Structure formats: C-alpha cells, structure tokens
Image: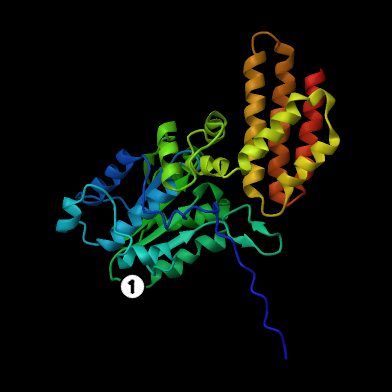
Amino acid sequence: MAKAPIIEEVPEFDEVDGLPLPREQTRLYGHELAETELLDAYRSQRFHHAWILGGPKGIGKATLAFRFARFILEHPDRFSTPVMAANSLYVPPESHSAQMVAAGSHADLLHLRRPWDLKGKRFKRDLPVDEVRRTTGFFGSTAAGGNWRICIVDSADDMNQSAANALLKILEEPPKQSLFILLSHNPGRLLPTIRSRCRKLTMRKLEEPMIEHALTEMGCGPSGNTEALHTLADGSLRQAALAANGGALDIAQEFTGLVETITNLDMIRAHGFADKIAARGAEDAWNTFLELARTFLSNQLRKDASTKPDALVRWADLWEKVGRAASTADALNLDRKQVVLTFLVDLRKASSG
C-alpha cells in the first residue's frame, strides 16, 4: 500500500512563537492617534482607496491594518449608526468577520506577502509579481458580502520592480469599493507614483512602558536585563517579544562576548555563533545579528568621530561591506555563515588597525 505523501507545514510569515499573528491580535498597543485617523477617514465624505502605513518594522502596522480591515468588513456601511458612534476600530473576536479574518479565510480580504520557498526552506527575498497579480482575480470577482474588498500588502518594501509596476497599474484604476493597505518600513523608497496614489499614515516607535505593558499582557513580560531588551527592541514590540523569549538576548550576549575580545578572536566560538545565525529558518537570528552589527559599527563611528578620524574610514568600509555581503547572500541564497565569519575577521582587523 502506497504511503500517503508527507505534507510539509509552511510557516507563517513573521511568526513569533507564542504570540498571536497580526490577523489574530485583538489588541492594539499604542497608535491611538493613527487608529482615530483611520476611523475618521472611513466615516468621512471622501474616503481614500489606498493607504500607506509607514514606520519601523514590528511596531504594529500589520496589527492596525487587520484591525481596520475587520472593522470595515464588519461594518461595510460607512455612515451606519455603529460606525458613526464608534470610538475605536475594535470588533469583538467572536464576530463572524473577526473569526474569518483570524483564520485567514475571509473571502473579501487578500493578504500579499513573500511566499515560502519549499526548496530553500526560507521565505523568498522578494514579493514577486505573481503574488501581486492575484489581485486581478480577487478584485475581478464579486465581493462575498456584496461590499468591500480589501488587499493588505505586507510589506510593500518587499516588492520587486515588476510587482511594484503591477500594483501601480491597479492603483491607477481602483475597482469600486476596494481598499489597499500598504505596509512599509521605508515609505520613501517606494515608487513615487505609488506614493502619490496613496494617503500616508506615519506610525511611531512604541515607548518603553507601552512595550513592557504589552509584553506582560501577552504573557512574555520582561525579566532580567530590561535595558538590553529595549536596546534590541528599539521601539519595536515584535523585536521586544523575540528578545523577551530569550533568543535575541542570547545572541546579543554571544555577540558582545565576541566583540569584547575581538583582537583575540576565538574562532571556535565564532564558528559556533555563525552556525546559530545561519541555521535554516533562523530568520530572526539573522536579522538580530545584522542589527547588532550595524548598531556596533554606528557606535564606533560616533565614538571615533572627533578623536580618531583615521578609524572612521575603516568603520565606514566595514559597514558598507557587511551590508553588501548580507544583501548578496539573501539575493543569491548563499551561505550566511560566511557573512558572519567574514564580519568578525574584518572587525578584528579594523580593531587592530
């Protein structure tokens, strides 16, 4: 008897163990002004069909986008009594719309993101044009509720040139009762023609007390070195959650230990650290390493700016080199371990110079 084929489980994009996905999250931490702006715009006489939610990664842009989508799908009449009386975008989690959105199965909501590469066991580097072209069939069909159809692009920064052009085409001639919500960590890098067709809403980094409150409510409250946690988080709730779960703090501790003794670099420790960063599926470890490397080099540049002008060239060159190597490794699916080891060896040379 033939064995049933093994169906490989595909991870969720930007998933953090133990925490709800943005589409499942019923709480919004901070961003009350942004929430109010969206609510007021929805019930105004002229509601724009496309929005850019801009701000650093992990501060809650996706959570707000899904919160807005839930509210619209639950209340499709913009001038109904519940909409006009609302003081937030909250929708009870037991409502039909909320349950469908949380399950990722609402027929009138399309979530575009970088697809999973089954062969490479990681998410693809770009959000490709084939994903964006799904909007053609999505907006070409009648909305299940006969009302709004909503597309969340998560994130618009990940689109390659072809994907961006495909999105621009549909933004230029938006279907009736359609809404586009583009998430962007760097809105200024989007095509000017895309930006000109969207209303931009800038979201700010979260304050430290708000991050600690949110982590406590989500069951992963900070313990131990909160200063290190906030340094790693830098206003990002997502990054704070990763740090609080232990992984990022462990990586930061190992990184600090290596750079503190960089002139006598222990290559055995360096290889062990690089293996952890380059492990399959360790996207968060990789991103944490890059953030730590950039923060370290930035601090060195500031420290030596007035006292060691000759050192500035070495730090700047190393900054450029690690950024270029990381981009190349991601683009060509190369071994990330070599990027980590090369950085540490180059750092030793720069520190000894």
In-image side of 323 versus 51 (left or right):
right
Measuring from the top left, give residue 165's x and y in whole percent. Answer: 51, 54
Q: Residue furthest bottom?
A: 1
Q: Is residue 37 left or right of residue 3?
A: left
> Which element carries disc 1, helix, strand or loop?
loop
Q: From what the image shows, is residue 281 above or below residue 184?
A: below
Q: Nearer the viewer, residue 152 or 92?
A: 92
- The structure residue drawn at horizontal position 67% and vertical position 32%, both measured from the top left corner, is 293
Image x and y of residue 308, in percent = 71, 11
Residue at horizontal 33 percent and vertical 65 percent from the top: 97
Q: Looking at the image, which residue sits at the far front?
A: 224
The location of residue 223, given as percent across then percent down, is 53, 37
Which residue is painted at 24% across and 61% down in the image? Answer: 75
- The residue at which mark 1 appears reads as 144
Q: Looking at the image, which is closer to me, 203 or 138?
A: 203
Q: In this view of the protein, which residue sits in the foreground, 179 or 260? A: 260
The image quarter containing residue 127 is bottom right
Drawn side of residue 195 relative to residue 348, left or right: left
Where is the N terminus found, in terms of image quarters? Answer: bottom right
Q: Is residue 8 above or below residue 75?
A: below
Q: Decide if residue 79 is in sight here.
A: no
* Residue 119 visible somewhere in the drawing: yes
